[in-house]
Image (cartoon, rainbow, N blue to C red):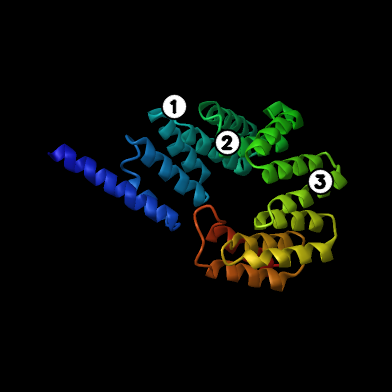
Amino acid sequence: MAGLASASDGVSRFSDAQMMYRRTNFAGVIELLKADAAQDAASAELVGQSYLMLGNAGKAVEYLNQAVVLEPSRASYHLWLGRAYGRKAELDFPLAAPRDASKARVSLERALELDPESSDATDDLFEFYLQAPGFLGGGFDKAAKMAEKIAKRDPAEGVFAKARLAEERKDYSTAEAMLRRAVELAPKQPRRLLDLAVFLSKRGRYEESDATFLEARKFADQHPRVLFREASTYIHEKRKPEEARELLKQYLASSNLGPDDPSKREVLDLLRKVSGS
């Protein structure tokens, strides 16, 4: 009976931790599940995800590796491990970054092998192949194959992926045409408008970009990420600092934030940056 009670307690703790994660209480997840993570793969994954959300990629890699060791056939564990290695590579010293980037690719490819229909693994591999140099396993040809796979699942997302590929190849007219086509295919998805607005802003077409951002703001109540992305674009390009600051404050005040949205830490980093502009 004691064993049953212990197992029941573990299930209850994990359920509580999942709710904490959805409410972005990542520190609470770690405190609650850290002891279970040594022997329970799902707990190790959730702790690793929480460390990643808190910006500690090294600890995230540690716990997600533990999840993979405990249950190596679970695609999601490899997916999150790949994400953690990718983030770690971004933060690494230059000599260490290629090693972790290669581990990110291997983990993501393994996730897709285990679950060929995984949209997350497909999307993440597209990004990796698009951005990484050939000696790390990246390349436009590989990215193009992922773009075709994405298009079969979601036509608008597939067109967006092909627009990204065209932009990387400096074929800006094709990229813009595809971004506008993605908006037509998914008029109720604010991220399609945001993709177009960011592209126009990068091309120096600020009036068109700002008008597109304004159109996307109509969705901000249900999709607060709209506010964050507009603000981060302004900050990156060193324009409209007051508006960017106000958008970030509105984002922080939103009641619809979830674990997949930019974290409070990211917002505060941007606010510090705009305050110093």
Task: Find the distance from the CA under tag 1 to the CA under tag 3.
Answer: 38 Å
Q: Residue at x 31, y 43 (%)?
A: 35
Any mark on residue 175, and which? 3
Who is closer to the viewer here, 222 or 81?
222
Vertical side of 114 occupied by 209: above or below: below
Residue 64: x %, y % from top left: 45, 37
Residue 31: x %, y % from top left: 35, 51
Rate crowding at label 2 as few (under 14), some (14 to 19) or many (20 or more) other CA atoms within 10 Å.
Answer: many
Who is closer to the viewer here, 173 or 73?
173
Residue 7: x %, y % from top left: 23, 40
Which is nearer the N-term, disc 2 or disc 3?
A: 2
Residue 11: name its quadrant: top left
Which is nearer the N-term, disc 1 or disc 3?
A: 1
* Residue extending furthest toward the left: 1
Vertical side of 176 occupied by 80: above or below: above
Quarter of the image where the N terminus is located: top left
Q: Residue at x 60, y 60 (%)?
A: 225
- Whether residue 243 is visible to the viewer of this picture, yes or no, is yes
Left or right: residue 193 versus residue 256 is right
Disc 1 + disc 3, Cβ < 8 Å: no
Q: Amino acid at mark 1?
A: Ser
Vertical side of 183 occupied by 245: above or below: below
Q: Amino acid at mark 2?
A: Ala
Q: Amino acid at mark 3?
A: Ala
Disc 2 + disc 3, Cβ < 8 Å: no
Rate crowding at label 1 as few (under 14), some (14 to 19) or many (20 or more) other CA atoms within 10 Å.
Answer: some
**Numbered disc total:** 3
Any mark on residue 121, and which? 2
Q: Residue at x 53, y 31 (%)?
A: 111
As helix, strand or loop, the secondary structure at mark 1 comes to loop
